[in-house]
Image: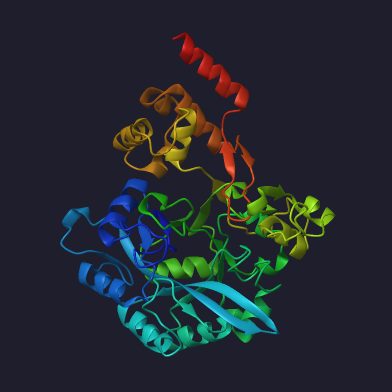
Amino acid sequence: MKFIADFHIHSKYSRATSKDMDIEHLDKWARIKGIKVLGTGDFTHSEWLKNLKEKLEPAEPGLYRLKNDGANSETRFILTVEISCIYSKNNRVRKIHIVVFSPSFKTCEEINTRLGWVGNLRSDGRPILGLDARELAKIVLGISQDCLIVPAHIWTPWFSVFGSKSGFDSLEECFEDYTKYIYAGETGLSSDPAMNWRLSALDKITLISNSDAHSPQKLGREANVFDTEISYPAIVEAIKSKDPQKFLYTIEFFPEEGKYHYDGHRACELRLSPQESKKYNNICPNCGKPLTIGVLSRVEELADREDGFRPVGATPFKSLIPLGEIIAEATSQTVATKKVIAEYQNLIKKFNTEFEVLLNVSSQNLQSATLPEIAEAIVRVREGKVSVEPGYDGVFGKIRIFSQKEQKERAKQKTLF
């Protein structure tokens, strides 16, 4: 069965998350988006785990669904958590985020018991532990070989395995003898698979993509598309094997839109390409402080292949923009306006899910269902006909589907009417 999965999210118990990140809202928005399998996030937090156990019941092996929801129980939940490991290794402070997949509540409880000896699991849904990433892998896989250890958003500067501020230059440097148990890495919003293909050392792992959502509306901004049995073992096996018949493709942000794609210094509103940063020796020319070196620079630094190289057997990907953002630009509104929300709801009502609209509905059917500029914008995004002002140092990039000239012409036409 073909389905979409988003494994890495956070609950309302994580910092800087929406109060709506509860099971009911997650189930509702997964259905709106068209996500079949959704990570729970935050299973190390005792209140969230209690919540999950109270409100979910077993479905297929290793997956769960809402209790007492009858035929409406379409969403399947998979038990996941992101853990922040902050520790010193080889005379440097390391800050690595790791996503852990668990096959059962029992396994979650055993993991929580062990990690509870290391640090405080109650203070945040994404716990911060003074634990070497290798030791985390050892503990988790020692409890269950069915768990999956995935380095999160592997290129972002501050908290990732290859991050410019606190990461490593290889998986082996980070995980040592446990590298053989690292089957996947998460691309993150500021990189896409094509950027990762430039590093031959990543050929042996599967590149997965997830939303890292902090609010329900952000679910699925990155995701994974499978064609396999819906169960924990089948999903994990599809990831481990990179079988192109089972793991079909990933859904990606345009990486330039990610908030760490370029180098820069937010305080000085300075955005720089890797070449420009080198010219300034990675120092802000305005204030003299170090630049935050972004994902593109880090890829350039570690790459052993030219841009455009595609490995044999690489999992394909499709770059999309969330539907609300497309409607907002096409109508010259902001995402939260009533007009944009109404048109979003109109398209969901007509075509069932956001991913159906973004990926599958024909241009002709879009033209008959919505404003011509919205239909045109959706088709342009599918074709990659967008321009982006790259994000940098925590500032999201600005994406444009229509040129400024086109926007001005449309504004003139509306004025004439």
Residue 78 horizontal/vertical position (percent): 36, 67
Count of residue discs: 0
Please, is residue 254 above or below residue 190 in the view? above
Residue 160 horizontal/vertical position (percent): 59, 69
Residue 261 visible in image: no
Q: What residue appears at the point 46 percent right and 39 percent down from the top-left corner?
A: 325
Q: What residue appears at the point 40 percent right and 70 percent down from the top-left corner?
A: 80
Residue 383 visible in image: yes
Please, is residue 152 above or below residue 386 in the view? below
212 horizontally vs 392: left or right: left
Please, is residue 175 above or below residue 362 in the view? below
Q: Nearer the viewer, residue 346 or 157?
A: 157
Instruction: Spot the residue most to the top.
Output: 416
* Quarter of the image that includes the N terminus: bottom left
181 horizontally vs 275: left or right: left
Q: Within the image, what quadrant is residue 213 found in?
A: bottom left
The image's colour scheme reads: rainbow
55 horizontally vs 125: left or right: left
Q: Nearer the viewer, residue 102 or 41?
A: 41
Residue 256 horizontal/vertical position (percent): 62, 47
133 horizontally vs 326: left or right: right
Residue 125 horizontal/vertical position (percent): 39, 71
* Quarter of the image that includes the C terminus: top left
Q: Nearer the viewer, residue 395 or 70?
A: 395
Q: What residue appears at the point 57 percent right and 39 percent down from the top-left corner?
A: 399
Q: What residue appears at the point 43 percent right and 85 percent down from the top-left corner?
A: 115
